[in-house]
Amino acid sequence: MTAPQTSPAARRRPPPDGMVERRGRAYWLTHLGLIIGVAFIFFPIWLAFVASTVSQPEIVRPPMPLLPGDQFFANYREALFSGINAPVALMLLNSGIMAIGIAVGKIVISLLSAFAIVYFNFPLRRLFFWLIFLTLMLPVEVRIVPTYEVAANFGMLNSYSGLIFPLIASATATFLFRQFFMTVPDELAEAARVDGAKPMRFFWDILLPMSRTNIAALFVILFIYGWNQYLWPLLITTDPSMNTIVMGIKQMFPSGDDTANWPVIMATSILAMIPPVIVVISMQRLFIRGLVDSEK
Amino acid sequence: MATLTLENVKKTFGKTEVIHGVDIDVADGEFIVIVGPSGCGKSTLLRMVAGLESVSEGEVRINGARVNEKEPMERDIAMVFQNYALYPHMSVFDNMAYGLKIAKTPKPEIAERVAQAAKMLQLEPYLQRRPRELSGGQRQRVAMGRAIVRKPAVFLFDEPLSNLDAKLRVQMRLEIKQLQRELGVTALYVTHDQVEAMTLADRMIVMNGGRADQIGAPLEVYANPATDFVAGFIGSPPTNFLEASSLGIADGQQSRIGIRPEHMILTARGAGRLDGHVLYTEALGAETLVHVRSSAGDTLTIRQDGAAPTPPEGTDISVAWDETQQMFFDAEGRRS
Ligand SMILES: Nc1ncnc2c1ncn2[C@@H]1O[C@H](COP(=O)(O)OP(=O)(O)OP(=O)(O)O)[C@@H](O)[C@H]1O
Ligand SMILES: [Mg+2]
């Protein structure tokens, strides 16, 4: 009998020696460079974290504290449950719903439209493809006024549907799925047809599972895109209970002469970073696989 | 268990006609091989039978019933593709079971049929693997298993062995033949390899530019080719062609003569019908191919026994043959 299947770990060979000599001084220099780079990026985040664990007077009095204080629980409790305009827990929930709604919506819509464009021969197919493609040139910021008008007329102000639907159409994702579907051999669709699969069955049973790494990669990208939306939520939500976290942070800055509650604002910032990080880390393996290799 | 009939089947893509009308009656359990050079329309013909390509004109009948308008699935056929077309994310078992699942076959029956097919194809140890974890030959077997479990009326193969190495190809060829006999199912098999065609076929269709030049049993086609194309295509090395006029036997009807390499023998200069010299020789062990350039400039291949003495290159010789072995072709290439 032939050799049994090798485990994925065994199949993954160690990388070949790089172009750079990896021993001696160069080795340490490389790491030193990397450490400095990481420290450089991490330092502001560290400062934000420190600021979120001390009390208000400690922040405003120079020098700035560099080590965490003892107000961690107090500050985070205040941020999460009362906040400044709205409790951060609620804003996190709003952001989560919006980001997931946008990511899932974009993926569903673009999967379906790519499927239609690649596998069906309908009149004006090319025209539709180019219409979708053209919208790449029209990001939210460009069409924000008419989009607002439409959303307002539909009564979607201060609602999740208002936050999500106008952002769902995605030329990029459609284009990506189209490219992927075109690499799927025609024979596969024909084999499914001979097996008696109707088009939607083929989509569900074969195309969708084959796209799962692409879907995961896109989900990560789109989730972060949705999470970081600022201008649109700012425009469409006036009720503090519908605020999303990214715009909420800005709303926390006092107007006029009030003093800013920096510890709570910083706690909010740190909290706002956590969900994207969780999404990236938990989907990291699928994400990287989706970006680098395609299923054979 | 089915008969298959093609009646004046034609295919046009846009304005170009690529199949110019093919007729054949396939008996129940018969193994038909469609053979021809690349681009002659073999796959197109097969795909019309499968229902993957619409029939432009004529009629395809399975068991006497017209199927032109039916979906592949309703035609009771199964197809094996050249690149296997296995579903990459499904296990071998699921690949084979997919068609049955769609047909809503009860689970125990699916399991039983797949097990049976897997046993027949020696795939039992691999049922839980993904296609990419299999060798080419094993993938090929899975593709056949997927066809078998459906118990179709007609089996369709489109160059199923062309991605395998030479040795495996010979082995799988035998297995396919055996399987088809065992199942007693009607089969239509496309290949461009004339050896495959000769060994597998009960009858073969030799296609040439969208036409069926000849339909017949392999040996019959070999011994009695209907056109010069068939004579040149079937048999390796190919038939030698000579202008009838150069031999002085032209009578208007017969423009070319074909003689198989094994029907020619080398003789001493002047003793044969045609003088020439040896270009080069290929000793293949059991047989030797002697390539000769005649004085008129034609290149001929002569096949002789491996044990027979081989003249060195450049030797002046003569070529002889029995008159009864001459095949005459008219100006259009048809037998006359
Ligand atoms: N979809 C199509 N549109 C236009 N022409 C086509 C199409 N499919 C096939 N053809 C043409 O029809 C002819 C026959 O093609 P077909 O694929 O049947 O050849 P084949 O005999 O299977 O060749 P091969 O041995 O290379 O597979 C070719 O000349 C090809 O260019
Ligand atoms: Mg072909």
Image (cartoon, helix red, strand yellow):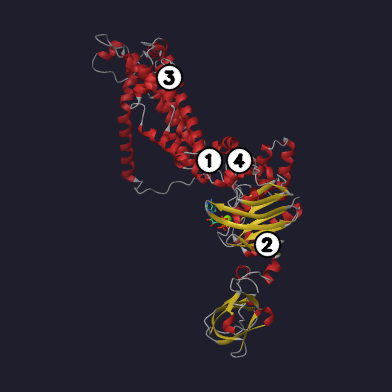
* Secondary-structure class at tag 2: strand
Disc 3: host chain: A
Label 3 vs 1, first from the N-terminus: 1
Q: Which mark is residue B204?
A: 2
Mark in front: 3 vs 2: 2
Amino acid type of disc 2? Answer: Met
Foreground pick, A287 / B75: B75
- Is the CB of the residue bearing disc 4 within 8 angstroms of ligand 2? no
Residue lying farthest to the front in this orientation: B252
Residue A271, percent from left and from top: 40, 19
Residue B48, percent from left and from top: 62, 50
Q: Which mark is residue B90?
A: 4
* Secondary-structure class at tag 1: helix
Pointer 1: what residue? A119
Taking the image as shown, residue A175 lies to the left or right of residue B299, namely left
Q: Residues within 10 Å of mark 1 (few under 14, many from 20)?
A: some
Q: CA distance from mark 3 to mark 2?
A: 67 Å
Q: Find out whether the residues at labels 3 and 4 contact each other: C-beta distance under 8 Å.
A: no
Mark in front: 4 vs 1: 1
Amino acid type of disc 4? Answer: Met
Q: Find out whether the residues at labels 3 and 1 contact each other: C-beta distance under 8 Å.
A: no
Pointer 3: what residue? A162
Foreground pick, B55 / B236: B55
Amino acid type of disc 1? Answer: Tyr
